[in-house]
Amino acid sequence: MIGVENWSIELQKSEFHSLYLSLLRISEQLIDIKNELMDEEFVTLEFEQLPWYIELEGKKEEWSLRFVFESQDQTRSFEMYWPIPIAQTLCYEIKNMWESMD
């Protein structure tokens, strides 16, 4: 279960794994360009691999994340938004949670 303030969503293990992989990939995108960004420069990164679409917006050290989930059989869809400053913390915690399950 993932939740922030007034909402939560329960993910199946396969959905959670694909979220973990998608977070790794968008994090890699940010790492790849981080040294080229000035501290005040604004960036938007997108990553899409079904069932997830992820959008990172912000600066190199502080950013938000928006997720759109669409199940393969189109029986379930939802959108999540993690604002600055909790996006980095939740991203880190999801990575740790998955790696501790493996």
Image (cartoon, rainbow, N blue to C red):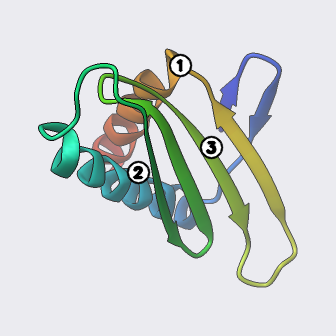
Q: Residue 10, percent across and down?
A: 72, 46
Query: Which residue is rendered at x = 45% and y = 60% of the image?
Result: 17
Q: Is residue 74 visible?
A: yes
Location of residue 49 in the rendering, given as x and y in whole percent from the top left corner? 51, 74
Which residue is tagged 1? Answer: 84
Q: Camera-side residue: 72 or 56? A: 56
Q: Mark 2 or 3, which is nearer the eye?
A: 3
Q: Do the residues bearing badges 2 and 3 touch, measured as CB atoms within 8 Å?
A: no
- Report whether 56 appears left or right of 12: left
Of the image marks 2 and 1, the number of the one nearer the N terminus: 2
Q: Nearer the viewer, residue 72 or 97?
A: 72
Q: Which residue is mark 3?
A: 66
Q: Nearer the viewer, mark 2 or mark 1?
A: 1
In the rendered structure, find residue 40 and report the number of the disc placed on it: none
Q: Element at badge 1?
A: loop
Q: Residue, x 79% and y 84% (percent of image)? A: 73
Q: Determine the residue positioned at 60% across, 24% down.
A: 83
**Residue 53, above or below 99:** below
Q: Give the farthest residue toward the right.
A: 75
Q: Residue at position x 53%, y 19% from top?
A: 84
Residue on which the image places disc 2: 23
- Where does residue 44 sit, x and y in percent of width and height? 47, 46
Q: Nearer the viewer, residue 98 or 70?
A: 70
Task: Determine whether 57 is above or below 28 in the image.
Answer: above
Secondary structure under the numbered disc 3 in the rendered image: strand
Between the C-alphas of marks 2 and 1, the distance is 16 Å
Crowding at dot 3, Cα within 10 Å, few <14 / some 14-19 / many 20+, comes out as: some
